[in-house]
């Protein structure tokens, strides 16, 4: 698929495994896990939580690392199987060959791949993502969502407008001699759209480190910090209110 065929959206998530849970918009409350007070008053936190889409593991699996070898199991294959190099999603190779053109048959993406580094596994999400020209995808752990434990995840930025391949998670097992679960009903990844021109030197090399604040900054500091804290009856969430009002105005202007 040519990335120019994305259409009006920024990204398309192509499900090659039809049984997987589709990606969904990330939620302001981090899938219901953050305190209610934070959802009401901490706009910085909730904005980070909702930026992007949740992507899920294609099925419930367990990984086991004894410090040397890695094993895996799932409901369909409950006995531990050693992960030598790579493993296919159950019955997917045949399904892939049925949907693929002749020159792609026999080249289904592996579901699990053991990486050379100790305890590291690559987990395919069952998706191939394509973005509109000029857009990349930041693939990272879910924002402000406490992981199940036993593994950490690497973060990466994918130029999905020029590359068509499986979207996967690189995880490092941090617990030995105990099973580590990847749950299909909990977000495994959070995928965020990023403009490529925001990542170049023209943006990232242009920053300042002045000592202190300018007179205009001090005016804003008094407005945002000093004056509100001098009022014992101030309503909570002033910053959240200002940000939400600005967003509503921007949306109204865009709609107009």
Image: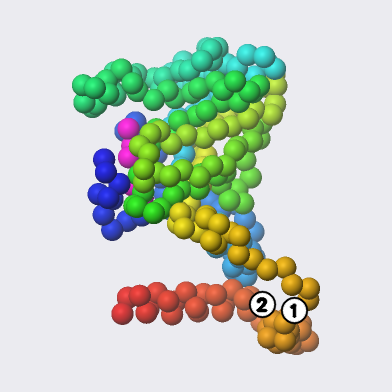
Badge 2 marks a residue whose secondary structure is loop
Q: In 3D space, how far apart are the residues under numbered discs 2 and 1 (Cα atoms)?
A: 26 Å
Q: Which mark is residue 53?
A: none
Near-viewer residue (156 or 245): 156
**Residue 15 falls in which quadrant of the image?**
top left
Residue under the point 64% across and 36% down: 152
Circle 1: is it few (<14), some (14-19), or many (20+) Cα within 10 Å?
few
Give the total of numbered labels. Answer: 2
Residue under the point 51% across and 75% down: 244
| Left or right: where 54 falls relative to 29 | left
Q: Position of residue 191 (x, y in %)?
A: 48, 47
CB under 8 Å between discs 2 and 1: no
Residue 35 in view (yes/no): yes
Badge 1 marks a residue whose secondary structure is loop
Q: Position of residue 123 (x, y in %)?
A: 50, 29
Q: Position of residue 121 (x, y in %)?
A: 56, 25
Residue under the point 24% across and 22% down: 103
Near-viewer residue (136 or 58): 136
Q: Is residue 30 magenta?
A: no
The stretch of residues the image draws in magenta is 11-16
Q: Position of residue 21 (x, y in %)?
A: 39, 39
Near-viewer residue (16 or 24): 16
**223 up-or-down from 73: above or below:** below
According to the picture, the residue beneath numbered tag 1 turns out to be 213
According to the picture, the residue beneath numbered tag 2 turns out to be 236
**74 up-or-down from 193: above or below:** above
Near-viewer residue (176 or 139): 139
**Residue 58 falls in which quadrant of the image?**
top left
């Amino acid at each position: 698929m040519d990335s120019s065929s994305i259409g009006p959206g920024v990204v398309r998530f192509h499900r090659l495994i039809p049984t997987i849970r589709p990606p969904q918009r990330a939620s302001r409350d981090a899938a219901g896990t953050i305190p209610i007070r934070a959802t009401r008053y901490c706009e910085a936190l909730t904005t980070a939580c909702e930026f992007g889409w949740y992507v899920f593991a294609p099925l419930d699996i367990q990984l086991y690392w004894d410090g040397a070898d890695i094993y895996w199991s799932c409901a369909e294959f409950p006995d531990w199987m050693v992960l030598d190099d790579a493993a296919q999603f159950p019955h997917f190779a045949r399904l892939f060959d049925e949907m693929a053109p002749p020159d792609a048959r026999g080249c289904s993406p592996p579901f699990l791949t053991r990486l050379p580094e100790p305890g590291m596994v690559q987990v395919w999400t069952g998706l191939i993502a394509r973005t509109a020209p000029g857009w990349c995808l930041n693939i990272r752990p879910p924002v402000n969502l406490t992981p199940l434990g036993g593994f950490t995840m690497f973060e990466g930025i994918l130029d999905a407008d020029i590359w068509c391949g499986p979207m996967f998670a690189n995880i490092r097992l941090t617990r030995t001699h105990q099973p580590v679960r990847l749950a299909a009903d909990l977000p495994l990844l959070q995928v965020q759209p990023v403009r490529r021109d925001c990542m170049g030197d023209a943006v990232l090399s242009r920053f300042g480190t002045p000592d202190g604040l300018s007179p205009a900054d001090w005016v804003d500091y008094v407005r945002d910090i000093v004056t509100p804290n001098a009022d014992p009856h101030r309503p909570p969430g002033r910053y959240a209110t200002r940000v939400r009002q600005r967003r509503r105005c921007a949306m109204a202007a865009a709609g107009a």
